[in-house]
Image: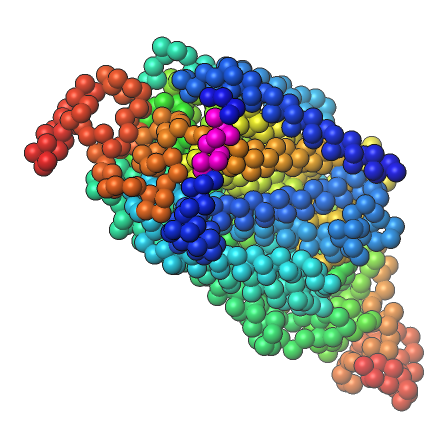
Amino acid sequence: MLNTIIIIAAILILVILFAIFRVSSLVDVIKGDSSTKIPSSNGLQANLLLLFLIAGLIGGFYYSFGGLEDDFVLPVASKHGVITDTLFWWTMAITGVVFIVTHIFLFGFSWKYQHRENQVAYFYPHNNKLEMIWTIIPAIVLAALVFTGWKAWMDITRESPEGSEVIEIMGYQYAWSVRYPGADNVLGDYDYLKIDATNQMGIDFSDRASFDDFIPREIHVPKGKPVRFNIRARDVIHSVYQPHFRLQMNAVPGMPTQFWFEPTKTTEEMRAETKNPDFQYELVCNKICGQGHFAMRYIIVVDELEDYKEWFKSQEPWLKQNADYLTEVPAKLREAASIVAGIENPSDLDAPNGLTISGSK
Amino acid sequence: MSITDIQVTDELVHDDDHNEEHHEQSFIFKYIFSTDHKTIAKQFLITGIFWAILGGGLSVIFRLQLGFPDMDMGFLQPFLGDWISNSGKLDPEFYLAMITMHGTIMVFFVLTAGLSGTFSNYLIPLQLGARDMASGFMNLLSYWFFFLSSVIMFISMFLSTGPASGGWTIYPPLSALPQAMSGSGMGMTLWLVSMVFFIASTLLGGINYITTVINLRTEGMTFRRMPLTIWAFFITAILGLLSFPVLVACVLLLVFDRSFGTSFYLSEIFIGGEALPNLGGSPILFQHLFWFLGHPEVYIVILPALGITSEVISTNSRKPIFGYTAMIGSILAIAFLSFIVWAHHMFITGMNPFLGSIFMFLTLIIAIPSAVKAFNYITTLWKGNLVFTPAMLFSIGLVSFFISGGLTGLFLGNAAIDINLHDTYFVVAHFHLVMGSAAFFGLLAGVYHWFPKMFGRMMDEKLGYIHFWLTFVGVYLVFFPLHYIGIAGFPRRYYSFTNFDAFSSFVDLNSFVTVAAIITFGAQFIFLFNFFYNIFKGKKAPSNPWNSNTLEWTTPRIPEHGNWPGDIPKVYRWPYDYSKPGAKDDFIPQTVPYHQTKESNTDFENEESKKEQSAS
């Protein structure tokens, strides 16, 4: 019933609008001043353009500086982020000025030089000097932007410093997996053919370095120390994005990528700064990857260095949590693996059914 | 003119058509399989309008999802069927399908075919003084390949597995593996087939445009006397000819990967519980190939719009376009540079960072010719005598969008800043302004300006103004706020933001943007009414309604096949002699020889006039 009324009302409104249109165009016909080709509301349009300029400038200014800036400018929490933010705001200042000045000219001229009887347009086909000026000045400004941007970019993307914490992040539909190198500080090999329902990351246990690797439920990184993410994906492209760290790198199947940064604020410090007691650094997927693309959340915790070391030590190697994967370790390394991973009675696994558990894979 | 007059002329026009149907060509060859460039242009335009409504409609639906995530969308069930769950929720994968289709439709079907297809076809012969395109038959094929491509893409939207849904950039492996998302099954296959036909259409059209411009200019129409519209269409066609074939190669390799087990783009993939045998391919290779077309493509979209704007602004400022040579130079520079900036879409894909710094350098260079164009438009307005026709307003709007969106390109082209902005709403705001809305405004400016020539009747001015203001303000209200949430790090292509604390703010902003989008979309129906109603009922157009200099206005009110009833007009001067000092009118058409305008000639032109006379 309600729908019918809405439809009838809509039709009526359209009919009324059409009637108004018809009447006004007939009035125009009767007024009939077809000798001039200047629209009757030419002045109105000029005024509206000027009004748009003024309202737009006031509205934009209010929106950008009226207190909302705290919402859209995320506090920066990494060393390189401070540099990219500086570049961002310099670019904003330069483009902001150009934006405002060109628009004042664009709409201002539109208003000022609106058609008037007896006004003759100025025949001004070119002025080489003027054109040189506005080719060269943008070129100089752009050169400055390029140069500073280039320096920052080369600095951010250079090899990670010696002694960085190395953490492996793997994206898959629709979650992240994270692996730490363990006590030996070396990540073990992986092989996508070894992936199964339990060994999600395809850790290759023929590599000694993988025995003590651990896979935590959330990422911990230390404040004030370079952290290097080794990034990969196992199905489609994902993107490791963390806006507070100004950090982003695609995760590409078949092509490992990496990004290093240095966190400058612990989670606790950020909670104080943002006055949000529940604040968490969130890892985001930022490359379309399927229907769960919008839900690939993973927590990153930034600790003080000591807390981080403690946390690091308290983690159990993945091999210990999944001891039946000892069968994938070559026989001669199995004992060493048990010791490194801290598996207490590995002899159980020598039993025939121990072998079949994972051997059936 | 009285009401009865309008009625009478309607009858007459109708009779004319009626007679021609019998005496000249059958209806099918006159209106469907026509080789007349004007009819083909209208076919492109109408098809483009159809796609624009569809593409815009899709955006309204997904904006509803973004603006009002808790909304009950049950009322859409009659249209979308099972894509709306019984509890009234939009299917997350169909959301992705809609953004994919929106992008594909708008970039290719509306702003490439609808814009270039319409105005290159319509204006190149008319403004050059040619009877038709170099090959009418190829032109016919060009439209019908586009039509076929449209039909295939349209059908793909009704598949039970949905149309392609991996984003309009269709990056593999997502687009290569049906296991990854259901839209990568049959929907993706049809997308690829449709695009191959689309590219065939673009190439047939492009070859034709280039040939026509080079060979069929009328006497006196040197390259230095060509209107900037033609320059823009000409260079656009060359861009398309050089870049679209690369997309064919790119797409073909994807077809091989999808259907024949090759590994061009696939390597080390474990999906759906099994490891795939593909080894050694590179998804980055696809991105290089895709953007080698994809970047020139954005200039294929914007250059014709800039060409149209040059013509409209100059005519309605009653002034020559400022810096004609610089305008041509900047078109050429943009065209050249557009081929060597593609990898700025790929700074953070894992591409070698050194390559990134080269592309950053080249990308920021392309800002210079773009800036020159903007400055030249503004200087053209300076000391003009501005007539605000709807076309003029849309052109001014275009310049505004081109500046706003172009400036944000300086952020994204800077690799260091791009780290944090890549794939956020900042990018969405940037390209919707600089290429989406700007090119769309170019298209509308073109329709308003050349409607009188196309259909022999005038569009309603007042409706045009209402349409302009709602659209212009609406576009800014939609896209300007998106910069802010982009700076806040909101990722694009998200079905909802509720999963993240960082993105839980700006709920009201998103609702606001959605409302603005609906109003903007609604305003387009004013245009549709104005357009279709006035094709049949509009006031009869005078032969040169805007007092313009170019050749198309020397044709009869409704030009027949062949365009000029008698001889093709000769050209004696450039197209921008507006308000020339000493001249009696404020415009001198290109067909007026110098020896007839002694009062306004420069010394150089007086020399020319002597040559003219000795020649005749």
Q: Residue at x 56, y 33 (%)?
A: B530
Residue B310 x %, y % = 40, 33
Q: Residue at x 75, y 33 (%)?
A: A10
Nearer the observer, B374 or A192? B374
How many numbered badges does the structure rendering display?
Answer: 0
In terms of secondary structure, what is the magenta stretch mainly?
helix
Where does residue B185 sit, x and y in percent of width and height? 67, 67
Quarter of the rendering containing residue A228: bottom right
Q: Is residue A211 visible to us here?
A: no
Q: Quadrant of the C terminus of chain B?
A: top left
Q: Nearer the viewer, residue A153 or A127?
A: A127
Q: Examine the image and state in which quarter residue A130 appears.
A: top left
Question: In the image, is residue B177 above or below residue B430?
Answer: below
Which region shows up in magenta? Answer: B5-13
Residue B11 in percent (x, y) is at 48, 35
B45 in magenta: no
The single residue placed furthest to the left in the displayed view is B614
At x 38%, y 35%, the residue is B557
Q: Residue at x 46, y 53 (%)?
A: B27
B228 left or right of A189 in image: left
- Would residue B25 be visible to someone looking at this image? yes
Res A129 → quadrant: top left
Of residue B245 and residue A328, the one placed in the foreground of this image is B245
Could you tell whether B43 is left or right of A226 in the image?
left
Left or right placement of residue B169 versus residue B307 in this view: right
Q: Position of residue B373 (x, y in %)?
A: 40, 33
